[in-house]
Structure formats: structure tokens, C-alpha cells
Amino acid sequence: MGQISFHTCDRMRELHSASLDGELSQLESVRLEAHLAGCPSCSAYAATAEGASRLVQQMPLERPSFPIVVPGRRLAVARKLQVAAAAAAVTVTVGLSVALGTVGGPAASGSSHRATASANLRFPDQELRMLQRASTARSHPRLAL
């Protein structure tokens, strides 16, 4: 035969862990026993896991020194309502901000276009020349045509 892959060994170790809790089907138990018979590494793991499981099962139960309270259904329902209310508030806020942003109309977009044009200047001397041309055009209206 060939070597057993690590993936197969990992899967068999998971099955052995489930077998300690009595959660395996007959088919899985047979596969596990066949693998353990041919794999010394998994056999050693199984022996260690069985010993640890036996120790845990033999330990006496301890009573906690504090009460453990499980939240009731009312609290869970209230939590879901809080999440739904928060989601609705976010939706309304986003909707209003979009609506108010589009109410400004073309005048608001024109001013932002002018601000964008001046923000795209790379050199201060270009801005200075642009300002000089604008002031000349205002003082000589015929030349601006």
C-alpha cells in the first residue's frame, strides 16, 4: 500500500474524538478502527485522547460559587428590536442625506465645478495669471467678448 496522508489522519483524529462522545455511526467506527490498526501515529493519539477523556469523566463535578443566569426570551426579542430600530435609523439618515444633497439643484453643482477648476491648478503663477486676466476683463468689458 502507500503512505497515509496527513489529511486522512486529521479526519480520523476528528472521528476518534467524536467516538469518545459516542457520536459515530457504525460505518465511521469501522473506518476508524481500520485506520488505527494501520497507523501508529493515530493509534498513539487515540490512546492519549482516551486517557485524557477518562480523567475528565472521573473528576467530581464542582458547583459554581456564583449563580448562572440565562437571559429569557424577552431580552432576546428586545435585542432584535434594538438592532432593527438602529438599522431603520441608519436607512432614514442615509435617505435624507441623499435627498437633501440632490435638492440643491444646478446652482450648487456650478459652484462646486468652479471650486474644482481652481483646485486643479498645479502652479501658483498660473492662478495669478488667471486672476489678472479676470480683473482685466472686468475693467474692459469690450475686450472680454
Image (tube, rainbow, N blue to C red):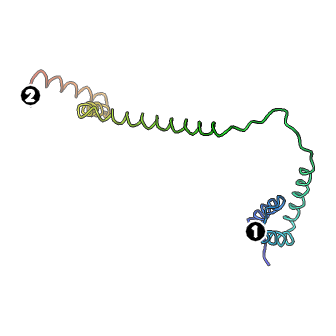
Query: Horizontal and vertical percent for residue 13?
Result: 80, 62
Q: Do the residues labelled 1 and 2 touch (CB within 8 Å)?
A: no
Q: In which quarter of the image is residue 92?
A: top left
Q: Quadrant of residue 31?
A: bottom right
Image point (9%, 25%), residue name: 141
Q: Mark on residue 19?
A: none
Asked if residue 99 lies left or right of residue 1, the reply is left
Type of residue at label 1? Ser
Task: Tell me which label, 1 or 2, sits earlier in the chain.
Answer: 1
Q: Is 68 in front, or is 104?
A: 68
Q: Is 145 in front, or is 64?
A: 64
The secondary structure type at the circle numbered 1 is: loop
Pick out the residue farthest to the bottom: 1
Instruction: Judge whether 46 appears above or below 67 on screen.
Output: below
Type of residue at label 2? Leu
Query: Horizontal and vertical percent for residue 118?
Result: 28, 31
**Screen quadrant of the C terminus:** top left
Asked if residue 26 lies left or right of residue 78, the reply is right
Q: Residues under labels 1 and 2: Cα distance?
A: 87 Å
Residue carrying label 2: 143
Query: Horizontal and vertical percent for residue 93?
Result: 42, 33
Residue carrying label 1: 5
Image point (13%, 23%), residue name: 138
Query: Horizontal and vertical percent for residue 99?
Result: 33, 35
Q: Is 95 in front, or is 68?
A: 68
Q: Nearer the viewer, mark 1 or mark 2?
A: 1
Image point (85%, 72%), residue name: 38
Instruction: Judge whether 76 appears above or below 20 on screen.
Output: above
The secondary structure type at the circle numbered 2 is: loop
